Image (cartoon, rainbow, N blue to C red):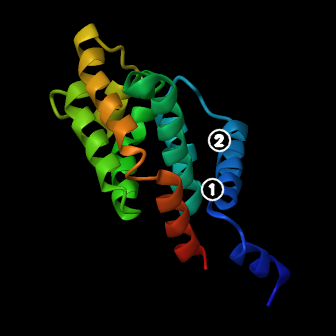
Amino acid sequence: MPKNRIEMENISNRALISRLYSSANLQVEEADFDTESWSHWYEVVQELTGPEKMVYVIVKLNQTVTNGGFTEFYENSYGVFAPEMIHVLNEIKAVGTAQIIASSLPVVNPTGLLDDAYKELVFNLKLSEQQREELYSQDMLYDQLHDQENLEDLLGDYLQKIIH
């Protein structure tokens, strides 16, 4: 058995997530893309490996929502990944978190735009005061869910299964 295989089997969830995030974030930072275009950024993220992409979107979700709530999440354009995040969160069994994001979508996308039209809307989003207030209730739900649904554990356990 190769040495790397043994090391990977003994790696903690936190270390595994950290390594995948560092790799993903480095690739995104080093990619030469137009930061004014959601599609260029989106394509760079889509080129990450499956595990890197999962970790990147979940870590960015958690960082932005923890730091500044769903207002920051959407105004910093990470909302372009919300549909993928919902899919990934359901995949790792973080269904409560997935539901909170799904509930935030009609607040920022009241007309129900899909795919590229949705991403274009969210990439340049400036929230109204009413939208900020509505998203604040999602922030409260997200904060309350932390004790019941630990994203690091769920993501790490899922990654451990698919990597081995």
Provide the secondary structure element on which disc 2 rests: helix
The percent position of residue 101, horizontal first and vertical second, equals 31, 40
Residue 112's spot in the image, x, y percent? 17, 34
Q: Nearer the viewer, residue 111 or 21?
A: 21
Residue appearing at x 39%, y 35% in the figure:
143
120 on left or right of 24? left
Q: In the image, which disc is placed on residue 154?
A: none
Q: Which mark is residue 17?
A: 1
Image height of 80 relative to 37, above or below: below
| Three-letter code, disc 1 | Ile
The one nearer the camera, 101 or 28, is 101
Tell me where residue 84 appears, x and y as whole percent: 38, 50
**For the view shown, which residue lies furthest in the front direction?**
147
Mark 1 and mark 2 lie on one chain; the one further toward the N terminus is 1
Q: Are marks 1 and 2 in contact (CB under 8 Å)?
A: no
Residue depicted at 56% across the width and 47% down the height? 56
Q: Nearer the viewer, mark 1 or mark 2?
A: 1
Looking at the rendering, which quadrant does residue 95 occupy? bottom left
Q: How many residues crowd mark 2 within 10 Å: few (<14), some (14–19), many (20+)?
A: some
Q: How many marks?
A: 2
Classify mark 1: residues with Cα within 10 Å, few (<14), some (14-19) or many (20+). Answer: many
Name the quadrant containing residue 32.
top right
Would you name the residue on which mark 2 appears?
Answer: 28
